Image (spheres, rainbow, N blue to C red):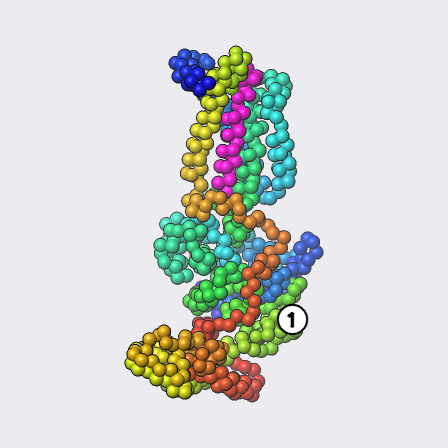
Amino acid sequence: MIPQLIEWLTDPAHWRGPDGIPKRLLEHLYYCLVAAGFATLVALPVGLFIGHTGRGGTLLVGAGNALRALPTLGLVTFLYLVVGGTQTATLIGLVVLAVPPILAGAYSGVQQVDRRVVDAAVGVGMTRWQRLWQVEVPNAMPLILGGIRNAVLQVVATAAVAAYVGLGGLGRYVLDGIRAVDYPKVLAGALLVALLAILLDVVLSGVQWLVVPAGLRTAGVGDVGRRRPRRPARREVRGETTDTGGGRVDGGAGHGLRKR
Amino acid sequence: MARAWGARLIEFQSVTKAFDDGTVAVNDLDLTVEAGTITVFVGPSGCGKTTSLRMVNRMVEPTSGRVLVDGRDVRSADPASLRRGIGYVIQHAGLFPHRTVLDNVATVPLLAGWTRRRARSRAAELLEVVGLPEEVGRRYPAQLSGGQQQRVGVARALAADPPVLLMDEPFSAVDPVVREGLQDELLRLQSELDKTVLFVTHDIDEAVRVGERVAVFATGGVLAQYSEPPELLARPANDFVADFVGRDRGYRGLSFVAGAALRPDEVETVTVGAPGVVSGDEWLLALDEDRRPRGWLRPRATVAGPLSEQELEPGGSLHTLGLPLRGALDAALSSPSGRGVVVDRDGRAVGVVTAHQVLELLSTERAAADSEPEGGR
């Protein structure tokens, strides 16, 4: 199977024309970027808003899970029948798929910013807007980008469904290959989808490295997600954990520093 | 920004805060914080001390009553600009992890519209004021120790030179030794900057150490006593305060008994490095060439060759002449010979005291204080 695969991939005929690899790759990439782009435009502001205000979080989790539960193929077919236009149907389906991870990333990113840091931001006199852009978003960057990477991966993998409703993309190879019992072609399609996914993920991890503030990288990006949650029940409770008890004996010197 | 003593800067007028679930965090608080003082709110968990503090910069809004800063109701100001004019320091510092230390400190000036250049040079100044080396400015908060982070937190609060500083358990998360250093630093800073500081802690030791006036809060948000530390320790207003101040309050009170009248005794000394030392029936105090105490040589010890530090028992704490009696008593109690070493301001030994001497002096001082109507402080 491997030699035939290599043969298929290296056949110059497969690199030309409307069914050639460059064309299909670009189509695939186009669906993915448009879908992920739209999803980001919709989900990012909503996620940031909900994370910032803390309002509607429960609703968001429910809606996110509901969206996740939708089978993309079924959705695309449904939309195809309702909307009519194949491309619109496909893109909407992919957007619906990409929204939940981006929403979740933005929401939890902002929501999990260390409560004390947010408290300090309010206390030094930042307005809500300043707090969001100067403190919450930079600190949420690792999770925001994590959500986007997640969404892109899923979209790349799922964009193959476009072929089912008669569009292009790398899914064509898989679908047409199965129909024609041309397994090297099926395999080549699958391999190209996987390679594209890996490539995009590498690119996005580079973007992530660029936009995540250096201070968070030093702290270890993983730390950000593990911070304690915001808004405990009552603030005074904090004191108890650090109580050292009353009877500590001082060193002899030091009291002369009192200002009297 | 120096103000006359006695001027009122923060006033709580019949302030009550009840939360939605019905808990009363602060109950009808009337209290005035004088300008240029460090005032400490202390009490157990849930006593409303933090809630009270947070009403000053409108992080919490009172259910009824008014909070005035410099004679103006805080609710007449826009919250964000009000807060920029009030320094705010919290436990764990709450530094912005994505910003360098320098930019953390420059936060408030930048919010106030300063140029980046001017804000940064001000921030660099502030790092020096709180005793941090310049290169710390380029680091990120995660790269600093807890104590350093707290210093940066204080610098950030001071950056726009606000007349009022709110400190909410600022030193509670650092270890006791570092905490003591930070407390000293705060007192030093205060002597230079003369801010009005409102300081919240649950640690009564910290409260009497740092505070010029201490407000003890009882559970349920009731102000139990508001007075100066010596008064608080000597005359608790009720059982709650007495209990909260603790069993050691007599001992803590020694921090406020002047030790000026203390007359240390002579002691037999020996210099480290001296050859062939033989001690008699008494402990010998070992000094270095500058007369700084190094330890004690036990009785009936014979040392061939030069006296090295290995032969010595480590000494106890040192009492600096002229400081309050608490240090003298501690020096005596912690010394292996039972005699506490008294040093001068340069750390040179001047003599020794026993616990007995300290206690005798204490009763003389007490008798003297009682014959005057009001202890003059």
Quadrant position of residue B16: bottom right
**Residue B140, image x and y in percent?**
42, 50
User: Where on the picture, by quarter, is residue B124?
Assistant: bottom left
Q: Residue at x 59, y 44 (%)?
A: A53
Picture coordinates of residue A60 (x, y %)? 62, 37
Which quadrant: the N terminus of chain B?
bottom left
> Which range of residues does the magenta coloring cover?
A140-167
- The residue located at (43%, 32%) in the rendering is A202
Q: Amino acid at mark 1?
A: Phe
Residue that sits furthest to the right in the current view: B22
For the question of whether residue A50 can be seen, the reply is: yes
Q: Is residue B271 left or right of residue A58?
A: left
Question: Which chain contains the residue that carries disc 1?
Answer: B
Principal secondary structure, stretch drawn in magenta:
helix
Badge 1 crowding class, 10 Å Cα cut-off, few under 14, some 14 to 19, many 20 or more, is: some
Look at the picture and state if A50 lies above or below B33. above
Does the stretch in magenta take in A247? Answer: no
Q: Is residue A57 above or below residue A34?
A: below
Q: Is residue B57 above or below residue B347?
A: above
Q: Residue at x 35, y 74 (%)?
A: B309
Q: Residue at x 47, y 80 (%)?
A: B332
**Along the viewing direction, whichever of B163 and B104 lies nearer the viewer:** B104
Lateral position of residue B266 relative to residue A126, left or right = left
Residue position for label 1? B240
What percent of the width, then of the height, locates residue A212?
44, 41
Mark 1 lies on a secondary structure that is helix
Total numbered circles: 1
Question: Relative to B205, does residue B162 appear above or below in the rendering?
Answer: above
- Comparing B251 with B209, the one in front is B251
Residue A10 location (% of width, % of height)? 39, 17
The answer to whether residue B365 of the structure is visible from this angle is: no
